[in-house]
Image (tube, rainbow, N blue to C red):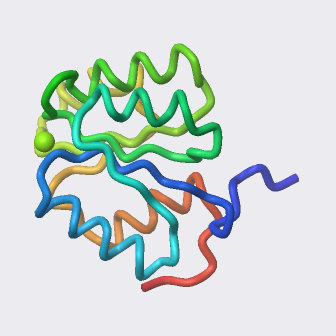
Amino acid sequence: MENKNMESNSLILVAEDEEYNYLYLDELLNKLGLKHIQAKDGQAAIDICRENENVTLVLMDIKMPVIDGYTAAQKIKEFSPKIPIIAQSAYALEHEREKFRDVFDDYLAKPINKEIFLMTLRKFINIQNGY
Ligand SMILES: [Mg+2]
């Protein structure tokens, strides 16, 4: 049994406070035909996940206002333990990655390489076409 979500019924939450970074991911997700919404801070990310049972994956920036991405991910996992949450961070140090492993399902280092981005999404969502 395939239990990954099909791309057509996937909704990706992009938690990202910097517009330039969001627009880059927006462009990649549009090319892949993946529906997505933005949260501009950690609290908004928590609220959106709580209110939308159809959010199938979260891309979580770490440095965000109100509540940081690490804390937001912990809170989301409390009420939605199965939702995949991928950290996206400029922190590339191994000890930072290690710290992220207990709460995040995967990790993307900024600047995000678009092929690595697609490979990482494919671990969680069925995506038929590339860019
Ligand atoms: Mg940020």
Q: Name the residue nearer the viewer: 73 or 54.
A: 54
Give coordinates of residue 14: x percent, y percent.
Answer: 35, 50
**Quadrant location of ligand 1?**
top left
- Residue at 13% from the left image edge and 30% from the top image edge: 65
Q: Relative to residue 48, is residue 67 drawn left or right? A: left
**Image label count:** 0
Q: Name the residue nearer the viewer: 92 or 42.
A: 42
Q: Relative to residue 69, is residue 124 drawn left or right? A: right
Q: Relative to residue 14, is residue 1 drawn left or right? A: right
Q: Quadrant of residue 48?
A: top left
- Residue at 51% from the left image edge and 46% from the top image edge: 57
Q: Name the residue nearer the viewer: 93 or 71.
A: 71
- Residue at 42% from the left image edge and 85% from the top image edge: 131
* For residue 30, above or below residue 86: below
Give coordinates of residue 28: x percent, y percent.
Answer: 34, 74
Q: Quadrant of residue 27?
A: bottom left
* For residue 21, above or below residue 48: below
- Residue at 28% from the left image edge and 24% from the top image edge: 70
